[in-house]
């Protein structure tokens, strides 16, 4: 059986990204630039001849809106709570200046949020289940920077590159999925220099 391909993608820029607010389970709308980023990502898939047999999104509006823009509304998708961002508890909506140094580990648990281990376990079990259940060979999932980086770290032993880098808006992690193992093949970024609204 052929390996399945997972394109795990971060949402476009939001108002809270722009204003440097902690944004986990709370939500903010895409900015005009975020909408543009999603369209650029959509063009990347078109230019590469990549189509999707199945698509999934975090239940958060910023992720759903990004997926709909990327696919131009042509691909039906499921909204999945397990793909949500890290829950930062009472830090939600506050200034990013209040974040502790990385790695966060279990810092946010005291404040009603999730530990790093909880985020990793949630993302790992959710994505494994979705990839086992789908018959599709090419799958798109739209999620969030922190959640995605932590999912990738679960499979660190299977990375086929040295470094994850920073999870940019609309950045994509490309995994192959075979025998219940995920292999990180590529980190795909985009050129947004043609943005005219800046």
Image: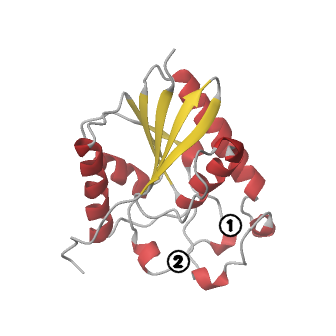
Q: Position of residue 15 (x, y in %)?
A: 40, 73
Which residue does the image show at 68% across and 43% down from the upper left? 155
Q: Is residue 103 visible?
A: yes
* Foreground tag (1 vs 2): 2
Q: Position of residue 54 (x, y in %)?
A: 40, 30
The colouring scheme, among rainbow, by chain, secondary structure or one colour, is: secondary structure
Q: Are marks 1 and 2 in contact (CB under 8 Å)?
A: no
147 left or right, relative to 107: left
Which residue does the image show at 67% across and 36% down from the upper left? 125
Q: Position of residue 39 (x, y in %)?
A: 25, 55
Name the disc covering residue 89, or none: 1
Could you tell me which secondary element the residue under label 2 belongs to?
loop
Give whichever of discs 1 and 2 has the lower sequence position: 2
Residue under label 2: 21
Could you tell me which secondary element the residue under label 1 belongs to?
helix
Foreground of the two, 85 or 113:
85
Q: Quadrant of the C terminus?
A: bottom left
Name the disc covering residue 165, or none: none
């Amino acid at each position: 059986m052929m390996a399945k391909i997972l394109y795990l993608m971060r949402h476009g820029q939001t108002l809270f990204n722009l204003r440097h607010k902690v944004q986990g389970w709370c939500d903010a709308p895409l900015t005009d630039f975020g909408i543009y980023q999603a369209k650029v990502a959509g063009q990347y898939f078109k230019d590469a001849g990549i189509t999707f047999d199945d698509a999934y999104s975090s239940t958060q509006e910023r992720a759903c809106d990004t997926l709909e823009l990327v696919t131009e509304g042509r691909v039906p998708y499921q909204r999945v709570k397990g793909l949500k961002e890290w829950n930062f508890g009472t830090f939600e909506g506050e200034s990013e200046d209040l974040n502790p140094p990385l790695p966060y580990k279990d810092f946010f648990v005291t404040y009603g949020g999730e530990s790093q281990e909880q985020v990793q376990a949630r993302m790992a079990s959710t994505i494994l289940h979705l990839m086992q259940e789908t018959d599709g060979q090419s799958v798109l999932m739209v999620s969030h920077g922190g959640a995605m980086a932590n999912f990738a770290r679960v499979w660190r032993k299977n990375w086929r590159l040295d470094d994850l880098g920073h999870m940019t808006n609309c950045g994509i992690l490309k995994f192959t999925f075979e025998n219940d193992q995920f292999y990180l093949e590529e980190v795909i970024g985009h050129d947004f220099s043609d943005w005219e609204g800046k």
